[in-house]
Image (cartoon, rainbow, N blue to C red):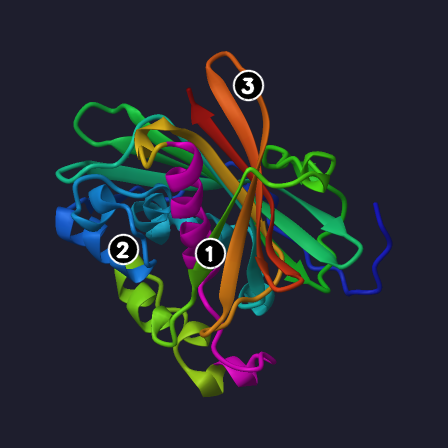
Amino acid sequence: MPETTAAVHEFDLDGLNLWCDEERFEVTGERIAEYAAATNDPIEAHRSGAIASPVFAIVPVFDALMAPAVDVVPMDIFGRITHGEQDFHFHRPIRPGDRLVSTGRVIGWETKSTGALLYIHLTCRDEVSGELVNEQYLSGFFRGVDAGPKVGESIPLIAANDDVKRGEPLAVVDAHVDDDQTYRYAPASGDPVPIHLDEEVAKDAGLPGIIAHGLCTMAMAGWGVVSEVAGSDVSRIKRFAVRFSKFVFPGDDLSTRIWRVGSADGVTSYAFETVRGDDVVLSNGVAEIAD
């Protein structure tokens, strides 16, 4: 285990693999369309509310997102958590009329040289049929925290694919973060965290100002990937994953660069990254698309 000078904070083993209470969510076409508009999604099926974009999958599970961590993480450091990685595994798209049930659990944690990583697994099922709609894995990062030796499991590896990204990208998709983006994204996603909405709160947290929601940036990359390599058909998306590398701000111009990795068993894998000039803001992007 890498050495750290931070004080040890004991995470509660009793919370490991403990599923949180189920959260229910009824999907409407209006909410799907609101989310598409809040992420500047140009795909008509998303904007009309006919079918949800990939990253909309975060909306039904949002209330279950951090609930498992409450049973594990000491409350004196709970507010220091930041989103490290997000990994969606899709079994089918989300559509209007779906009644979804979500729950989550902490599957493990470990200490790195700069802080502790907490690993969370979420499931989202159809309330009527019980079918699995999607699974999600995410890491939460606590800078400067020592959680002791590794416990439990990590989330699935998100490959860097650095060799592939040395070549010319297959496609490049541009997006702009509007000045009012966070104020539109917050109600559409159900994420009211004040560092995205209140300048003073953001500065008190050590930020230069309001930052964009990481999942809004991921959603922008998502519609870029779906448009370019999935024929604008979200039903072909089987996996969509990123690492959040740097903060994004209102007014930023972004570009998502996409590379083909290879095909197997009727699925083609792509690597992608989203940049702001020379800064990589989303790294280790992976998209798996059914042929």
Tell me which amino acid carries mark 3. Ser
Q: Label 1 to label 3, Cα distance in Å?
A: 26 Å
Badge nearest the viewer, 1 or 3: 1
Label placed on residue 35: 2
Asked which quadrant contains residue 159, the reply is: top right
Residue 109: give x, y in percent of width and height.
65, 45
Residue at 48% x, 19% y: name it: 267
Q: At label 1, which amino acid type do we have?
A: Asp
**Residue closest to the far top:** 265
- Residue 173 at x, y = what percent? 47, 50
Q: Which residues are magenta?
A: 202-230
Q: Earlier in the sequence, mark 2 or mark 3?
A: 2
Can you identify the residue that label 1 sits on? 174
Q: Residue at x 61, y 80 (%)?
A: 206
Camera-near label (1 vs 2) is 1
User: Is there any visible trace of residue 228 in the rendered image?
Assistant: yes
